Image (cartoon, rainbow, N blue to C red):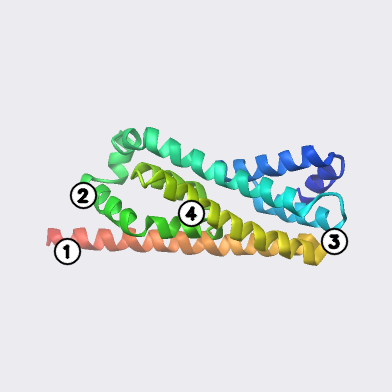
Amino acid sequence: MLEFINNLFNQLDPLTAYIVLGLSAFVENTVPPIPGDTVTVLGAYLISLGKLKFWGVYLSTTMGSVLGFFFMYLLGVWFGRSILNSRLGKKIFNEGQIEKTEIWFGKYGYWIIAANRFLSGTRSVISLFTGFFHLKWYLVLGLAFLSAAVWNGLLISAGYMVGENWELIANILSQYNKIVIALTLGIIIYFIVRRQRAKSVQKK
């Protein structure tokens, strides 16, 4: 996969490469399996070769990330309540849980948005939930930009420094993503188990 992406970029002119970088960052926020961060690191490698410019890679990937996050936020705003009120939504959340989650997101949601780029694999879920609970759009947009700007700056700097060994950063990212997803699943399982125990105690 990495070799295919590398070969593809070697055949693109700079403008098309910037567009592809931006699109990959956008899609990565809407379809998590897309390796948007890996493509960003490859863009950094192409900077080291002189094929692309730093600001072209940085701006295209950052704007793609922000627009992808905000697109999912808007989907959450437009369809969130209908999803939560659907049969599947009611099976997952009851009214009390929705209210508690909405209060929790009101308190901590903006901090989560600020950290979203560092939470690989959960970005699209975070953006959807910020839309579900109608967090203020201008803060969502601003914090999403801040998060993407910092994360992409770190990625591009790392990719530029390692040069032709850019796949090393990609492999580190892969391991990092696995750890983040495992921790996220662990937290979810913990709360599910705690909820079930609380229910069994109430029945007694």
| Front residue of this view, candidates 93 and 124 | 124
Q: Is residue 33 visible?
A: no
Instruction: Indicate which label's residue lies in the foreground, 3 or 4.
Output: 4
Which residue corresponds to the image point at 78% horizontal and 41% vertical from the top-left? 17
The mark that comes first in sequence, 2 or 4, is 2
Q: Nearer the viewer, mark 1 or mark 2?
A: 2
Q: Amino acid at mark 3?
A: Glu
Q: Residues within 10 Å of mark 2 (few under 14, many from 20)?
A: few
User: Which residue is disc 1 drawn over?
Assistant: 201
**Residue on which the image places disc 4:** 143
Q: Which residue is mark 3?
A: 164
Rendered location of residue 185, percent (x, y): 45, 59
Mark linked to residue 96: 2
Of callouts 3 and 4, which one flags the residue occurring earlier in the amino acid sequence?
4
The reply to whether the C-beta atoms of the residues labelled 3 and 4 are less than 8 Å apart is: no
Mark pair 2, 4: CA separation: 29 Å
Tell me the kind of residue under disc 4: Leu
Q: Which mark is residue 55?
A: none
Which quadrant would residue 45 be assigned to in this image? Answer: bottom right
Q: Residue at x 80, y 66 (%)?
A: 162
The tag earlier along the polypeptide, 1 or 2, is 2
Query: What residue appears at the point 40 percent right and 47 percent down from the top-left corner?
Result: 130
Which amino acid is tagged 2? Gly
**Residue 79: image location, x then y, percent:** 38, 33
| Image x and y of residue 186, in percent | 43, 63
